[in-house]
């Protein structure tokens, strides 16, 4: 007796519904509730930064409003020159891909400036080294060589770095204010701006 071969089953119908996404979980809700409290704490740090660091008269960078960043990728204060070629940021950043949050002061090219104009002669490296001479008690300044990046140079510290301090928030504010002062007092920022606005 020959055993009959079963008919091949029909292939499963293709699921044309929207792709599955991660569901909302308890951790998401907890984060949502805690965000406003975090921003309030960051506001206090940023106020302390402004108290500690006040740019000199005639400084070519002006504060871009008094409301800190969008709270999506960063939260902090921003300054730009009149021609809107460079932006200086000071505050907390966690980036587009959600890396661990960091305290950061950075200089970046705005859309009106081709960042490669600064990188071509290694001026972003020179500026970082110059700023570092006024910041060595704290940290080093980094520079960004990626030609696709709008970042030029800056200083960053993990948010956990100051947890052991007696007053972590005050120490973080001091770090940010000191980095801003280093950019200005070393002449690094002014030198890069002069190059950026050169005809």
Image (cartoon, rainbow, N blue to C red):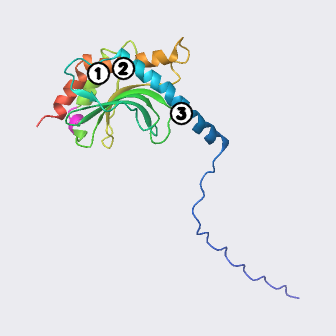
Name the residue carrying label 1.
183
Name the residue carrying label 3.
36
Magenta-colored stretch includes residue 119:
yes
Task: Say which residue appears at 23% left-offset and 42% top-offset.
Answer: 114
Q: Position of residue 91 (x, y in %)?
A: 41, 27
Magenta range is 117-121
Q: Which SS class for mark 3?
A: helix
> In the figure, 34 relative to 177: above or below?
below
In the displayed orientation, state which residue is furthest to the bottom.
1
> In the figure, 154 relative to 185: above or below?
below
Q: Earlier in the sequence, mark 2 or mark 1?
A: 2
Quadrant where the N terminus is found in the figure: bottom right
Task: Say which residue appears at 26% left-offset and 30% top-offset.
Answer: 124
Task: Say which residue appears at 45% left-offset and 21% top-offset.
Answer: 45
Q: CA distance from mark 3 to mark 1?
A: 31 Å
Number of residues whose C-alpha sits closer than 10 Å to that of mark 3, classed few (under 14), some (14–19) or many (20 or more): few
Q: Which SS class for mark 2?
A: helix
> In the figure, 108 relative to 5: above or below?
above
Q: Position of residue 121 (x, y in %)?
A: 20, 33
Q: Which mark is residue 50?
A: 2
Q: Nearer the viewer, mark 3 or mark 1?
A: 3
Q: Earlier in the sequence, mark 2 or mark 3?
A: 3
Q: Which mark is residue 162?
A: none
Q: Position of residue 37 (x, y in %)?
A: 55, 29
């Amino acid at each position: 007796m020959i055993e009959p071969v079963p008919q091949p089953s029909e292939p499963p119908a293709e699921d044309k519904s929207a792709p599955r996404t991660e569901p909302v979980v308890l951790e998401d809700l907890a984060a949502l509730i805690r965000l406003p409290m975090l921003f309030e704490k960051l506001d206090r740090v940023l106020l302390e930064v402004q108290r500690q660091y006040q740019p000199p008269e005639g400084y070519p960078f002006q504060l871009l409003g008094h409301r800190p960043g969008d709270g999506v990728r960063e939260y902090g204060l921003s300054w730009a020159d009149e021609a809107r070629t460079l932006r200086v940021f000071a505050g907390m950043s966690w980036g587009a891909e959600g890396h661990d949050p960091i305290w950061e002061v950075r200089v970046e090219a705005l859309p009106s400036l081709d960042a490669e104009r600064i990188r071509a002669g290694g001026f972003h490296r020179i500026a970082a080294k110059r700023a570092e001479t006024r910041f060595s008690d704290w940290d080093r300044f980094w520079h960004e060589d990626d030609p696709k990046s709008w970042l030029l140079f800056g200083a960053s510290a993990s948010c956990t770095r100051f947890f052991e301090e007696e007053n972590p928030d005050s120490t973080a504010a001091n770090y940010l204010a000191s980095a801003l002062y280093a950019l200005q007092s070393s002449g690094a920022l002014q030198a890069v701006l002069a190059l950026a606005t050169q005809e």
